[in-house]
Amino acid sequence: KEAVYSDKLQHYSTGRGSPGMKIYIDPFTYEDPNEAVREFAKEIDVSFVKIEEVIGAGEFGEVYKGRLKLPGKREIYVAIKTLKAGYSEKQRRDFLSEASIMGQFDHPNIIRL
């Protein structure tokens, strides 16, 4: 697994960017998008999330305003993206790929998945 991860990372970092530039691994290099999500995001227990209201809609479904309260942490407001009912296999793969990309972000204004 480590070698596969290094190969994918190297593919996207070789000859690109500058010192200090962040890179990511393209989830489409994984045959199964579920594998990319497991690699870069963690599942949050639904009991820690309170969904409040729809605040918009995206390509995949509605986006909700909610609150996340993890044990030992303060409660924070979050945006919750959903996958609409009746989705196609391509939409599911794209949704999971987006989640795996978002799971690689490391910024104070972006919640780690």
Image (cartoon, rainbow, N blue to C red):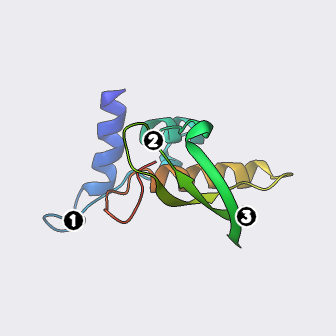
Q: Which residue is farthest bottom? A: 56
View extreme (left): residue: 19
Relative to 95, is 4 on the left or the right?
A: left
Residue picked out by circle 3: 62
Q: CA distance from mark 3 to mark 1?
A: 32 Å
Q: Position of residue 82 (x, y in %)?
A: 69, 55
Q: Amino acid at mark 3?
A: Glu
Q: Earlier in the sequence, mark 2 or mark 3?
A: 3
What residue do we see at 49% from left, 49% from top? 100
Q: Amino acid at mark 1?
A: Met
Residue under numbered circle 1:
21
Of residues 80 and 95, the one nearer the viewer is 80
Q: Nearer the viewer, mark 2 or mark 3?
A: 2
Which of these two is toward me, 10 or 101?
A: 101
What residue do we see at 74% from left, 62% from top?
Answer: 61
Q: Helix, strand, or loop for circle 3?
A: strand
Camera-nearest residue between 32 and 15: 32
Residue 103: percent from left, percent from top: 44, 50
Q: Verify CB contact (< 8 Å) between mark 2 and mark 1.
A: no
Q: Earlier in the sequence, mark 3 or mark 1?
A: 1
**Foreground of the two, 9 or 14:** 9
Read off the residue under disc 2.
70
Q: CA distance from mark 2 to mark 1?
A: 30 Å
